[in-house]
């Protein structure tokens, strides 16, 4: 069996260009993000052991959902009852889990207002769902990293509604068959892998429930990756970057535009 790297992928935000995002979050941004963490198959046992240790220490039986933890809601409403010092201890131990397990954060984040400003007039209702762009970009770049280290890549997507899962599998199959779906004239500067290279590197696609510890870790990484595109001073994003836990940290500066975390349609935010 070849050496295999795993890409655990969660989503954040609204994937349809014309759908309202629902309740406006306090940060005021409107994105769709897809990504999470990369981990070598041989490192998963160590990551799961660290996850189990944290959950055992805090008597946690529910999935570590970023939204619930940040809002102190649902199964994490008990966080709102902790004294400040104890709450800070929990957050620090949770961060140390993210920082010390052998994973690398990666993904693609699309600013929805920027996407619509760029493509609405030209393509109208023919615009892609944002998940097509985000999946294709993030998986192709993950494949570059895996391939560069002599690994194949397995892609695990959090199981959602059947339609979304079907689309994700179609995007995966299309990458292996025909390569990335973008206009070669505009995407050539990113030096995408060829269809043959992707077919050689992409090893398997599967969906997983949120009960998967690594899928929960993907969730916890994705939110700071998303917010970090708008606010690089965000504490968790800044710490992950400083601690070398993002894919950009593994690349030379000139490699980041074609291989790092992708912030797409950022014209209304500021070029990224």
Image (cartoon, helix red, strand yellow):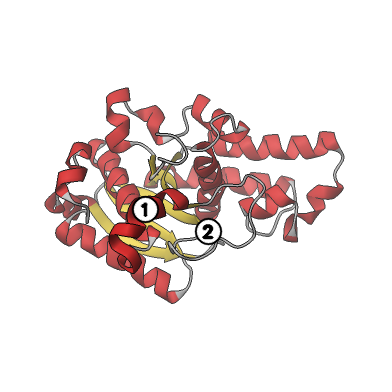
Q: Of callouts 1 and 2, which one flags the residue occurring earlier in the amino acid sequence?
A: 1
- Location of mark 1 (residue): 134
- Helix, strand or loop at mark 1: helix
For this view, does 122 lie left or right of residue 220?
Answer: left
Residue 43 pos. (x, y %): 43, 42
When asked about the image quadrant of residue 270, the answer is top left
Task: Specify the quadrant that holds the C terminus.
Answer: top left
From the viewer's perspective, is 159 left or right of 155? right
Q: How packed is label 2: few (under 14 Cα within 10 Å), some, or many (20 or more)?
A: some
Q: Nearer the viewer, mark 1 or mark 2?
A: 1
How many residues crowd around disc 1 within 10 Å: few (fewer than 14), some, or many (20 or more)? Answer: many
Q: Nearer the viewer, residue 192 or 39?
A: 192
Q: Secondary structure at mark 2?
A: loop
Residue drawn at point x = 56 percent, y = 39 percent: 98
Residue shown at 82%/49% (left/top)? 80
Is residue 192 among the parts visible in the rendering?
A: no
Residues 60 and 184: in front is: 184
* Whether residue 235 is visible: yes
Which residue in the rendered view is the most extreme toward the bottom?
162
Identify the residue shown where x is 22% and y is 50%.
Answer: 201
Q: For the residues marked 1 and 2, what is the alpha-carbon distance in whole angstroms?
A: 22 Å
Instruction: Quickly name the residue at label 2.
Output: 212
Residue placed furthest toward the left: 196
Q: Nearer the viewer, residue 103 or 74?
A: 74
Q: Quadrant of residue 136?
A: bottom left
Which x, y percent locates residue 137? Answer: 31, 49
């Amino acid at each position: 069996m070849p050496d295999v790297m795993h890409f655990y992928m969660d989503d954040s935000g609204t994937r349809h260009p014309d759908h309202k995002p629902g309740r406006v979050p306090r940060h005021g941004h409107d994105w769709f993000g897809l990504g999470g963490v990369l981990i070598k198959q041989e490192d998963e046992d160590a990551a799961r052991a660290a996850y189990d240790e944290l959950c055992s220490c805090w008597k946690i039986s529910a999935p570590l959902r970023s939204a619930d933890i940040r809002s102190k809601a649902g199964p994490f409403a008990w966080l709102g009852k902790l004294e400040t010092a104890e709450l800070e201890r929990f957050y620090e131990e949770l961060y140390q889990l993210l920082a010390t397990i052998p994973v690398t954060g990666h993904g693609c984040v699309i600013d929805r207002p920027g996407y619509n400003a760029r493509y609405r007039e030209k393509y109208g209702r023919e615009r892609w769902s944002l998940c097509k762009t985000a999946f294709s970009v993030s998986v192709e770049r993950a494949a570059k990293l895996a391939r560069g280290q002599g690994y194949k890549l397995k892609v695990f997507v959090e199981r959602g509604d059947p339609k979304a899962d079907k689309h994700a599998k179609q995007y995966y199959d299309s990458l292996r068959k025909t390569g990335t779906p973008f206009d070669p004239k505009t995407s050539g500067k990113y030096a995408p892998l060829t269809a043959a290279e992707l077919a050689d590197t992409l090893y398997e696609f599967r969906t997983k429930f949120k009960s998967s510890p690594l899928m929960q870790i993907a969730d916890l990484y994705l939110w700071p990756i998303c917010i970090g595109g708008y606010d690089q001073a965000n504490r968790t994003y800044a710490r992950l970057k400083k601690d070398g836990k993002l894919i950009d940290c593994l690349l030379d500066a000139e490699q980041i535009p074609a291989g790092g975390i992708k912030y797409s349609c950022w014209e209304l935010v500021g070029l990224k």
